[in-house]
Image (tube, coloured by chain):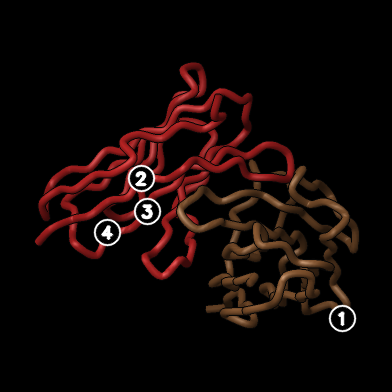
Chain colours: A red, B brown
Amino acid sequence: KNEVEQSPQNLTAQEGEFITINCSYSVGISALHWLQQHPGGGIVSLFMLSSGKKKHGRLIATINIQEKHSSLHITASHPRDSAVYICAVGSNYQLIWGAGTKLIIKP
Amino acid sequence: EPEVTQTPSHQVTQMGQEVILRCVPISNHLYFYWYRQILGQKVEFLVSFYNNEISEKSEIFDDQFSVERPDGSNFTLKIRSTKLEDSAMYFCAGGLAGRVQYNEQFFGPGTRLTVL
């Protein structure tokens, strides 16, 4: 069983739509990370959270520790948001990665 | 803005050869990591490193792998005798703190290793 599960695997939407990507995990954690992987392969950290909600621009991340679930939302999506979004959970010194959600935003 | 750099961007090698992948972390970072991503698969943790010692390593990081910080700026990953299955993108990352609940990680652009 995968320790970190993301859904959906692929998501195509029209520009302007509200996007939700979900992450469920089975391990006990102290932090959850959302990262973005660009088409060229580069990885950027978007959020690190251990409770509640964080917002950065059009991105919002929430986590429910009791339910072991986190969501990443994108408001007013734009074609430049097209990327792979990855959830990873922190366990001691390592990150355990999900498989990612490939997001395509069409103009 | 400071960034993590990695060289080379692409390395092609023959099976059985040794390779060294290089990373220059952000200067005030203290904890360093190597990850790999086989094409089409998820990112996998290899090793974390602090104060010139390995903090944690995965099952992937066997005796064929080693890491060092030879001069206080470079952080290297060596694969002694490459196998076909070592072909992957290798990412270096760094952070200010070790345990990942406190630690936003900053990633390099990756080195694509192709083993023929």
Q: Residue at x 63, y 79 (%)?
A: B11
| Location of mark 3 (residue) | A84
The mark found on residue A101 in the picture is 2
Badge 1 element: loop
The mark found on residue A12 in the picture is none
| Location of mark 4 (residue) | A82
Mark 3 and mark 2 residues within 8 Å of each other at the beta carbon = yes
Callout 3 amino acid = Val
- Looking at the rendered image, the disc whose residue lies closer to the viewer, 1 or 2, is 2
- Separation of residues labelled 3 and 2 (CA atoms): 5 Å
| Location of mark 1 (residue) | B71
Q: Which residue is drawn at 51% across and 44% down?
A: A33
View extreme (top): residue: A66
Q: Which of marks 2 and 4 is nearer the N terminus?
A: 4
Q: Nearer the viewer, residue A59 or A8?
A: A8
Is the residue marked by circle 2 packed among few (<14), some (14-19), or many (20+) residues within 10 Å? Answer: many
Marks counted in the figure total 4
Marks 4 and 3 belong to one chain: yes
* For residue A14, above or below residue A43: above
* For residue B88, above or below residue B102: below
Quadrant occupied by the N terminus of chain A: top right
Q: Which residue is drawn at 42% across and 33% down?
A: A23
In the shown orientation, is residue A83 left or right of residue A45?
left
Callout 4 amino acid = Ser
Is the residue marked by circle 3 packed among few (<14), some (14-19), or many (20+) residues within 10 Å? Answer: many
Badge 2 element: strand
- Residue A15: x %, y % from top left: 11, 55
Callout 2 amino acid = Thr
Marks 2 and 4 belong to one chain: yes
Callout 1 amino acid = Asp
